[in-house]
Image (cartoon, grey):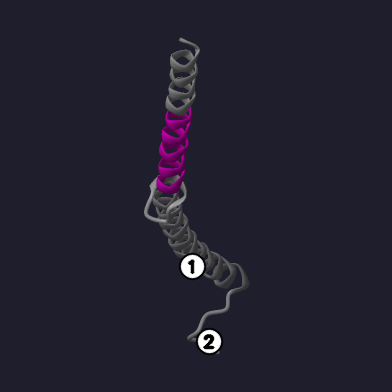
């Protein structure tokens, strides 16, 4: 009977190790999907980059518009214009 008990105990330990290995493999796959450039973190960075590029373009356009308006105001206040030079 002790031989059967020993075999049963070894089988339980083997099954427990197999479950732990499966959990580790599943965790590794999940981690690979998260860190992979094609995963959700990569997608988030891509979307963030697109937002930053859009904001940069908008800021550049606004800067040009403000500079143009400031130039007109300065010309009006100083009485200078391109025609007088």
Query: What residue is shown with label 2?
Result: 84
Quadrant hosting residue 77: bottom right
Q: Is residue 25 magenta?
A: yes
Q: Quadrant of the C terminus?
A: bottom right
Most common secondary structure along the magenta stretch: helix
Q: Is residue 8 magenta?
A: no
Rendered location of residue 74, percent (x, y): 59, 69
- Residue mark closest to the camera, 1 vs 2: 1
Rendered location of residue 23, percent (x, y): 44, 32
Q: Residue at x 46, y 64 (%)?
A: 65
Rendered location of residue 3, percent (x, y): 47, 17
Crowding at dot 2, Cα within 10 Å, few <14 / some 14-19 / many 20+, comes out as few
Instruction: Give 18 or 53, whichever is nearer the viewer.
Output: 18
Q: Image height check: is 24 above or below 3?
A: below
Residue that extends furthest to the right in the rendered view of this protein: 78
Q: Residue at x 44, y 48 (%)?
A: 32
Crowding at dot 1, Cα within 10 Å, few <14 / some 14-19 / many 20+, comes out as few
Query: What residue is shown with label 1?
Result: 64
Residue that extends furthest to the top in the rendered view of this protein: 1
Q: Quadrant of the N terminus?
A: top left
Rendered location of residue 76, percent (x, y): 55, 69
């Amino acid at each position: 009977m002790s031989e059967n008990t020993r075999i049963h105990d070894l089988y339980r330990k083997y099954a427990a190790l197999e479950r732990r290995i499966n959990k580790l493999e599943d965790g590794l796959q999940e981690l690979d999907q998260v860190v992979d450039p094609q995963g959700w973190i990569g997608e988030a960075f891509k979307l963030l980059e697109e937002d930053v590029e859009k904001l940069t373009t908008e800021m550049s356009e606004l800067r040009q518009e403000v500079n143009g308006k400031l130039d007109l105001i300065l010309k009006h206040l100083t009485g200078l214009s391109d025609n007088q030079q």
